Image: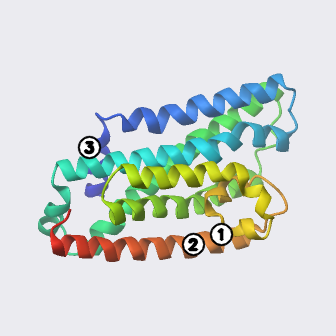
Amino acid sequence: MLFLKMQFLKMKRTSIVPIMLGLPIVTVSLFACLAFFAKQTDLQLFRVTALQVFLELVLPLAMTLIVGLMFRIERRNHAFQNTVTYFKSLKTYYLLNFVFYVLIGVIMLLLGYLLYAASYVIFTQQLDLLNIDFVTLFMLLILTFLPIISFIYMLNYLFQGFVLPAVISFLLTVGNFFVGVIGIFASHLYFYSFLVFTLYTGYNKLILVVISLLLSIIFLIIGYVKFLKSMEKGQL
């Protein structure tokens, strides 16, 4: 817990905080207003309009920026070398750092999700979204966001720089706009679109969750192996 607190304090005076808080607020508020003025007040339509751009474009890119910027801060402060002093196990450091990014992701998701809910209630004067499905969808969003976070986390260890991980993540994010052309079955493997898939019927949510967890584990293992090799060679 102390490590997580230190990580949050470390990013407090950086541009990460405006990215983490500002992008969800601006994006979801803007598209919620567009949904209202377009008279898309049906719950399903409103949810898709308010959240889709945030989930398929803004959130992955924001996470890419945050992880990349934090890695630059860690290198500048020689934090990777200090892990040997403060942590008995490199695995503990690696997993705690991943948990830190998951918490940031959850904060952004929660902020965007609550704004969507508040906008719907304000614009329609209805409370029909406040049910078990409301909570279930949020949990699905967290689980399907995990492979994106773990993938970006892995990329930063693999390439040890900001540009290449950002370019790869950006290209995959742009690919979200074209995922429909590969068909519904093949698209179950395009994990950058899993967040948006949770908003629609036609996708097996259980399969999305299982694939998300499997991919997250694979990405974390690959990143950890690279992390160990980099520490042994003194490259971090």
Tell me which residue sits at (80%, 37%) in the image.
46
Q: Earlier in the sequence, mark 3 or mark 2?
A: 3
Q: Quadrant of the C terminus?
A: bottom left
Q: Say few, some or many: other residues with alpha carbon within 10 Å of mark 2 (under 14 / 14 to 19 / 20 or more).
A: some
Q: Is residue 180 above or below residue 128?
A: below
Tell me which residue sits at (64%, 74%) in the image.
210
- Residue closest to the eye, 173 or 205: 173
User: How are the residues colored?
Assistant: rainbow
The answer to whether residue 94 is seen in the rendering is: yes
Would you name the residue on which mark 3 appears? 10
Would you name the residue on which mark 1 appears? 209
Question: Where does residue 137 sit, x and y in percent of width and height?
Answer: 70, 55
Tell me which residue sits at (79%, 25%) in the image.
123
- Say whether residue 188 is left or right of residue 82: right
Residue 48, quarter of the rendered image: top right
Q: Which amino acid type is marked by label 2?
A: Leu
Q: Which amino acid type is marked by label 3?
A: Lys
Residue 125, quarter of the rendered image: top right
Quick check: marks 1 and 2 in contact, CB under 8 Å? yes
- Measure the alpha-carbon separation of dots 3 and 2: 29 Å
- Residue closest to the eye, 87 or 195: 195
Under circle 1, the secondary element is: helix
Q: Which amino acid type is marked by label 1?
A: Val
Would you name the residue on which mark 2 appears? 213
- Measure the alpha-carbon separation of dots 1 and 2: 6 Å
Question: Where does residue 202 sit, x and y in percent of width and height?
Answer: 85, 62
